[in-house]
Structures are given as C-alpha cells and as structure tokens.
Image (cartoon, grey):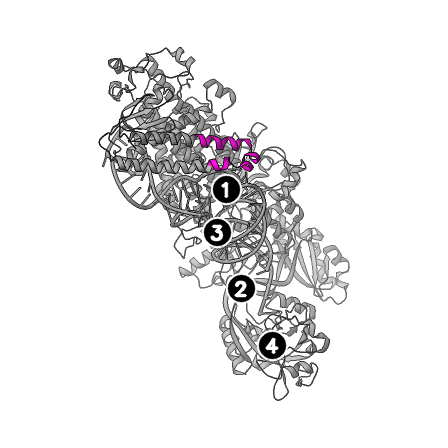
Amino acid sequence: MSDIPKTYEPQSVEAKWYEFWEQNGCFTADPDRVSDKRPAYSIVIPPPNVTGVLTLGHVLNNTIQDILARKARMDGKEVLWLPGTDHAGIATQNVVEKTLKKEGAIKHRDDLGREALVAKIWEWKEKYGGIILKQLRALGASCDWTRTRFTMDPEYSRCVQKVFVDLYKKGLINRGKRMVNWCPGSLTALSDEEVTMKEQKGFLYYFRVQVVEQDGTAVKGGAPGKAALAASSGNTDNATMPTIGAVETALPADAPAQFGPETDEQGRVWLTIATTRPETIPGDSAVAVNPKDPRYAPFIGKCIRRPLPVENQALLPIIGDEHVDFQFGTGVLKVTPAHDKADFEIGQRHKLEVIDIMNPDGTMNELAGRDLAGLERFKARKLAVEKLTEIGALVKEEPYTNNVGFSERADVPVEPRLSEQWFLKYPSVEAARSCVVSEERRAPALREGGGDNEPRGAGAPRSEMRFYPDRWAKVYDHWMGGIQDWCISRQLWWGHRIPVWTITLAADAKSLEPLFNLDLPIDDYVGLSDTGAKMLGSEILRFGHKAAGVREWTVFAVGNYSHEQISTLEKAGFTQDPDVLDTWFSSWLWPFATMGWTGDKDTDAKNPTLKAFYPTTDLVTGPDIIFFWVARMIMAGYEWMGDLPFRNVYFTGIIRDKQGRKMSKSLGNSPDPLDLIAKYGADALRFGVMRSAPLGQDVLFDEKNIELGRNFCTKLWNACRFRQMVGSSDIPIEGELDPVVMNTDDKWILLRLNTAIQEVTQAFAEYRFTDATATLYRFFWNEYCDWYLETTKAVLMRGSTGAPPVADRALAVGSEASETSTVSELADAQVVEDGAPSTAPEAAALPTEYELRCRRSTLAVMDFVLGHTLRLFHPFVPFITEELWHGMGFNGELPRTQGGDTIMFARWPKAFDGEFRDHYGIDDCYLQFAENKYETVRCGRNLRSQFNIQSNRKANFMLKAPDEVIPHDAAVLKLLLNAETLTIDAAYAPAKGVPMIPTPLGELYLPLAGLIDVEAEQARLTKELEKTLAEIEKVKAKLGNPSFTHKVPAEVLREHEERLASWQQREQQIRSGLAVLGG
RNA sequence: GCGCGGUUAGCUCAGUGGUAGAGCAUCACCUUGACACGGUGGGGGUCGUAGGUUCAAUCCCUACACCGCGCACCA
C-alpha cells in the first residue's frame, strides 16, 4: 500500500494515467479477442468537425460514450470506440476562407482558385485538425486512437464514390433542374434539413392590378362577373357579399368579404393582390385564383397587367388553381415560378414561363428591371414598394409575421431557386423505418410472446433498434414516412467531388464513335439528349445519333474509376462535375466505412473488424441530427451491410446556460471545457455534467454542478485516506470478511452496497446515467461517509496507537456490562461485546485479541466496500478511481487482466448471491436495526441542538431502552452523539424537568435539570404531541373507513397499522416526557 | 394547424396510486483524531388551473393555461 498524498491533484494524475492507458494499449480493440465468452462492444464517435474545438456538448456526448465503453470493458467485453473527424464541407470551407480573408491573403475564393483553396484547407486540416481529438483525451475518452478516421481519408473517399456509383446504377440518383433551397450566403444548394424556419416580422403589401382582355384592352365593369362588380363598385370598405347566383354558397360564410374585384369610375376593373415579397413581381408570370371562388372565377382566362418592372408591364394570364386559399390575403395569388416552390408547381401545371430575376448571391438581375437590377434582395423589396406607390398600385401595407426558411449555416434566408442539382431517392427506406421499435409498437409484440429478452449487444444480429428516450422513435417514424428526395450536390470546393464526368457531343455517329473506344465499360455512359431522352452507352452507340430531333447528347460517365481511367476520360474531353457531395453523404457511411468496408462482398466478408464490431452496439448523439445523420446511417446500413448500423441510440439533451439559452459564441455563455478541467479536474467535469443530464432532458449548465463534482472527488479521496490512516501495516489489504465478529454497521453498509450495485447496474441497462450518479452519490456520501465511516471510529479508535485510551472513552453502561466472552460464544449468540469491560479500565491500554479481530474485520469491510465503490465509480470518474485503485493497493492481488494492471479491466461488481449472504449472516433485518440506531442518533443531535449544546461540547445522555442494547451499538451511539456518557437503563426514572425526545430505541433524555426553561420545553413537547396526534387521527380515519379496509391490499393495510402503532408509541413517549416536566 | 416534451422547495431537477425528495442557495452551531471542496441541526412546497375516475390522486383520465421543441405551412 503506497501512501496517498494529502490532496488530490487532478492535473498530474490525469496526465499520468492517460499516458499509461494509451501506452499499454488499454483502448485498443482487437477483433481476434472476440469470442462467445468475450462479446464485442462497439461505438463509433459522432465525428466532430475537423476544425472544431471541444464544447460542453461534446463533453456530455463523449462522456456518455466513455462511460459506456468503460463499463463494457469491465463487463469483460472487447470494446471498440472508434474516433474520427468529419470534413464538414460548408463549415470548414467557411472557416478557412474567412481566415484567409482576415489575413488579407484573398478577397474572394476565386483569387486562389479551386485547387489552391482546397490545398490551403488541407494544410489547415493537417495543422489544426487534430485539436478536438487531443481535447477529448483530456476528458479521459478511451477511444481506440489507432483507428482514427477522417471522412476524406483516401479509403473513406473510395467508399463514398462506390456508394454514389452504386446508387446511380440503381437509378436512385438523378440530375435534374428542380426547385432547391439556395443559400445566397454560401452560394450553394442545401437539403431541406439544412433549412430552419424562423418567424420574421415583415409586412403584407397589397397592390392593385388592372384586369384586361388577352389583347390588353380594359375589361369593363359590365363584363362577366357583373353582379360581383356591381356589388363592389369601387367602394373600398365594401363588406357586401358578392352574389353570383347559385355559386354564392361556394364562398365559405366566414370568408373575408372585404376583398374582391373593384370597378372604378371609369368602369375599369381591378384586383388586389397581397404579397410579402413585392420585389419578385417582375418574376411573376401569372395571377391565380381559386376556380371555386365566386369573386374571381369569372376572370379566369382574362389577364392582368403586371406593374413591375415599370418598363415591362407584361400581360399575365389569370389562371384558376385549387391551391389558392379563399381566405388568405385577398384570395388572389401572384405566381412566381422561379422563386417559390408552390408557385413553381402551379407554373408546371399551367406551363407558365419561369422568370429568374435573381443572381446566385441574392441580388437582382436585369430581368428584375432597371430599377431593381443589382440591388440586394431586401433593398430591392423596399424599392419595389416605392415604385408601386409611385405608380399608384400600392393599396396598403400591414405588419405581418410569417415563417421564413433560413440557412442553418450562414443564417440568412434561403432563396427558393430553380437549379440543376443531383438528387437521391433514399434507399432501404422501409427496412430502416420498420427496424426502429418504440415502446408503443413493442408492447403488443411482447404480449403476443414475440418479444426478445436478449441482452443488449449480445448474440446474433436482430433487426431491431431502440431509441433512448423512446419518444424520438415517433419523430423518426414520422420523418421516414414523409421522406423527400435528398439534394446531395453542393456548390462548394471542399468535399468529395461528384464522381461523374460529362461531355457534350453532337448527335451524329462520327462525333459519338470515338468516345466508346475508351477503356471503360460501355454502360458506364449514360446519355441525356437535348430533348430530354435518356439512353445507356450501348444504346447511344446503336441508334443514339439517329434519335428524332436530337441535336446533341450530354454523356455522363459514372463509375469507380482509377486515376488512369480518369485521365483517359479527361484527355477525351470529359470534365468532372464541379460540385461536391453534401457532407452527410459521406457521414452516413460512418459506421462501416470507418471499419474498412470496400463494397466488395468477398473482401468485406473476410474483414475481421467488420465481422467483430458491426453492427455497433450503441450510438450516442444529439436529437438535432436525427434526420441529418441517424436516419441516413440506418438506411445506409441496410443498403450496403444488410443490417442496421447500431442497436441502440441514446439521444442526449442540448446543453444550455442557466437561463435556458443555447450555448453560443456570440452570447459568450459557453465556457471552455478545458478551462473547467484545469480548474476542477476532468473527473469533476464528467461527474458534474452527468449528474445534471437526465435522459431526454436538456441540460442547464451551471458551474456549481462541476464544483459539486470536484467536491465529490475530494470526498472520495479523503475517505480513502481515512482508510489508510486507520489501517496498520500488520493488516493485509482486503483482509477476509469475518462473519463471526461482523457488527451491525458492517452488515448494514454491505447491504447498502448491494443495493447500490443493483441500482447502478440496472440504471446502466436503461441508460439512466444520471440515476446511476445519484445512487453512487447517495451511497458513498450519505451512507458510507456520513454513517458507516463514523461508526467504524467506535471500533478502530479505541486503545490503538494514537487513539485515546479506552479508559477515557469508557462507556457508562453501568454495572450490567458483562464479562468478556469468548469469540465462539459471541458468535453463537450473535451479540458483539466491545471487549472493554468497564470494570477493568487499566487493561484497555492493550487491545485484546478479540478487539484486534474486530478491527481487522471492520478494515476488511471498508476495503471490500471501497474496492467495489471504486469499480462502480470508474466509468464516471476514471482518473481518480485509477489513482486510488493503485494508491490503496486494490490492484495488488488481482490477475493482471482483471484489475491487476488497471482498474479499467477490473470486473464490474455483482450483487451478492444467497450463499454470500448466508455465509456472512447479512440479513435484511440489519437494515432496520441500523437505521433505528441512526435515527436515534439524529434525535439525540436534534435534542442537543434544541438546547444549544454546541457540537464540540460533550453531553450526558440517558436512553430508556426497553430492549437490550449491545455494547458495540451503545459505543456507536455514544460516539455519534458526542456524549460524555450514555447510560442505558430500562428502569430509568428521570428527575423532574429533564428534556426528552422519543426515538425508535426508546426515550432519550438529556439531563439538564435546572438549566432549562421548563415552560418552553413543555411547549415544544406539546407541539410535538399535537403533530403526532394529528397523524394518528389521519391514519385512524383511514383504518376506520370500511371501504378502505375492505378494498385495500393486505400489505397496504399492514403498513397503515404499523404506522399507527409507531405514532402511538411516539405519543406515549411524548406523554411520559411531559409527565417528567410536571405537566 | 398537427405532434412531442415540460409545469413539484428561492434555483436546477428526481419521484411514486397509500407519510412529498436531492443538490445548490439560505439560517444557526461547530476549525470534533479523512474531508471547511467539511460536519451537525433547522426553515422552506395546498406538486400549473379546473373537472373526472378511485376507499385514496402530485401520480391515472379530460379540458384549459403557460413555457420549450419538432413537423407542416397561406402568397
């Protein structure tokens, strides 16, 4: 046993042990070690951005993973925790571009050009890319660093390419001109998931347009819709319902009737349109009304004159489309197919012109007209309103709040924009959807006997996945049910290039022929003609040049090409698609691409890592990426591995500040975890975060919690120091538990330990880590330190070296103290004698053989409990437990692979079995017994406090106990009460005026006769009596109620009866106390 | 609009159909032979509101209110 230093110094200890673990390969997973007896356990880290730095979110997330990994190792599993980083396309390119701009190196990315910028980013990645992984080490993360992966590693890139080609060949990837979410900030398309809706305060602008015939001549008030026009004769506050005979009822009764066509004095007819985006008016190509709307239906087929741009007030058709809502705005919708998804669809239905009036960066182009051209879109909006006002078209504007899609990354409103992109129709949707089994869906299956009781992570693959907390399964299911195509191309430079090469050729045999002499499989070519026809390479070769009306072909080469093949293609004039793939298009392969997957069935079947560790056991991530990442990984897992990628998904909460706000750089409310580690230690940070992060709840971060973690570590440290201070060198570490002399407190703490083991183990099985920490905290602090450790002083600190002689602490148990008994007699009687007969105080200076045996026993119990406790704690606080494991010498006698070298591989504690309990006589009855004793102590302390007897002052107590109190228990009572004397006497007759408190062991008196205010004491006891009587009344009322006694389960009835009895006992005790006071 | 969480002590949160809990904060006492990053004792809650089921509701059911989140959106 080496000596433990006086204070715990996390910094040096953490560095020391991390290095030890890493150098000894403790984190390294070896698939060859996996067997039936040693099952595999695996987690892949959610790869942080390669440019990222550690945040509290990472701390939470990775602490949980580390806890799981460490627990699995202690369970005897072969553990792989696979780390790595993500190239994070937009984010990384942004960071590097910004830095370069800041340094003045460039003004725009074009200054460098594609290759040079990508090279710069690689440089950056090599320089700073590992930061976050180093930071994870400081946290104690037990990742297998030998397997660190990056999503742009060459092998990983090959996986991405392979998957793209595979999907393309399956017909799931298509290129097309569709409406996408365009980010004018990052100048790229985004997927729907990257757009978040935000409420925006703006205005709804109403403007008038004139209705005209198709030839442009004015429609007069007397034309179709006569009645309607008559009814709305230009009066703006007209509230009369339009009437067109039978159609009238089609307009809902609650429809706002204040809008409708208006006729002015000259008989001209006007419609009013409401819009939030007047700057897009130049892009309008129609005006739509609902054909069932009687106000406007008659105008379908007519035209309006578009007000902007003023130099090009084109005639637009009025069309009928069901999409238009009667009740919204004026019931007239301007249709801008180029800049609105719904409008685009209307445009498709009605074959409308698509007028794109915007540049990619969100400024207006020349089609927007001379006034708006060149303006940024929001400035253009202002100007458009001014122009409408100038030409007298603007009717009014009213404040309006609507939801606008924002680019998550750039935090600017996205622009719906028509553009050519690559789209993926998701694969394996059904398998992915049905494998996630929620409680709700699982319950009926269990009832039918179809449930599985298989332990987590063991045995053959089962196609079932659980989410923790369960409710995310519903969210997942909902999303999977309405899944849309995924726009996978990004107009960025940093990322995986799309493995597609294209060339455009004239549609004649001569032009096409040479192409097919290249050394590529002919059906790697896919042709798209200028008429929209699609053909495979072999077909183009046969008759592609003869296809009707086709003037040219764009030929796509899509395959897993070698460098040579690529250069051949490029020499032949092919150019690679300039876009890169969405980052998530590589992340979704993470669980198997990191394990050396190649896509070649035979090779993969022989891959020991995949064989041993796929599917992974647990995934720990935030619910914010459930669609981005989790759902897509599940689909990818099924598509390419034929099995789910993980069996359990744990969704963490989001870390917020004390006020519940998200952590953000701009708010400055995001503490640096490394500062916290420096200040409190990594274990403190881990414990503090885990203790405040319940399953499924967001975490409100408060540094106080970390402080609590630090305090806890200190407590653990000091409790171990105490063990060392009381131990002596002649007692071996972890001596045998001695059933003969084990006292009631020993048995109690062993029982509590057993409960703690059960609770923590169960909490692990259900991913309730916060509950596990709460149990550990309670057990160690409130049970072990507060009670057990204090009771051991009654055994350990009498007579031994350094402790006061027994004579000083002689119990005033009176003349009934028995003579010393032999050990065997004591064992038979189950009564422990404290070995310090008051009749022979002089003999106490030398501890008796029996006394020594008791001390050895208690030390053995302490070691037993501490050894178990350290192991229970290790997953949460790995550093301090490792330090103490060695410092206390618990590693000493263990096999090297089971805790001899490191606590990391010590076995996870098991709850006691029946044999163990029988052998040591650990019966549950000791729980109540010890707790009665502790309650009596509490009562006595309370009494002291009532009479202002300071903690450091000794007092004399009298316990009028009807039952015998054995010397050990008496000694504990005396010690914990800090009593000068404790007299236990069943026949005690207190003098008048002695204060009393009822306890489970009998009335406890504090003889202070003459020193107390009798009246005040009477008042105190009377108040106590009243409370007791009230409780008795409550229980009696229940027990007197026949419907209660008849319907209630026997156990509840018994509980109530016992409760009544104990309250009644208390009543008696108080009454006798009052009697003593002379009341 | 649809869906999901939440509402319990001053704060952050556990919790159970049968006597309301923890940590922090607070008050008082204590530098007692591990620990002041500590010990001891105390104060503090009609468990969001209104109904219902039940012998019994903080817990189950219904409605409502407020807070948060997700999805879908109407210009």
**Quadrant of the rendering where the N terminus of chain A is positioned:** top left
State the SS at label 2: strand
Measured in 3D between alpha carbons, the distance from the residue under mark 3 to the one under mark 4, in whole angstroms, is 60 Å
Identity, as a three-letter code, of the amino acid under mark 4: Phe
Identify the residue at the far front of this view: A1079
Q: Which one is in front, A115 or A596?
A: A596
Residue A519 visible (yes or no) = no
Identity, as a three-letter code, of the amino acid under mark 1: Pro
Measured in 3D between alpha carbons, the distance from the residue under mark 4 to the one under mark 1, in whole angstroms, is 62 Å
State the SS at label 4: loop
User: Is label 3 on the same chain as label 4?
Assistant: yes
Residue on which disc 4 sits: A259
Task: Tell me the number on the disc at residue A1076.
Answer: none
> What chain does mark 4 sit on?
A
Residue on which disc 2 sits: A404
> What chain does mark 1 sit on?
A
Identity, as a three-letter code, of the amino acid under mark 3: Trp
| Horizontal and vertical percent position of residue B68 | 48, 55
User: Is label 1 on the same chain as label 2?
Assistant: yes
Q: Is residue A239 magenta?
A: no
Q: Which of labels 4 and 2 is toward the front?
A: 4
Asked if the residue at tag 3 contacts the one at tag 1, i.e. Cβ–Cβ closer than 8 Å, the answer is no
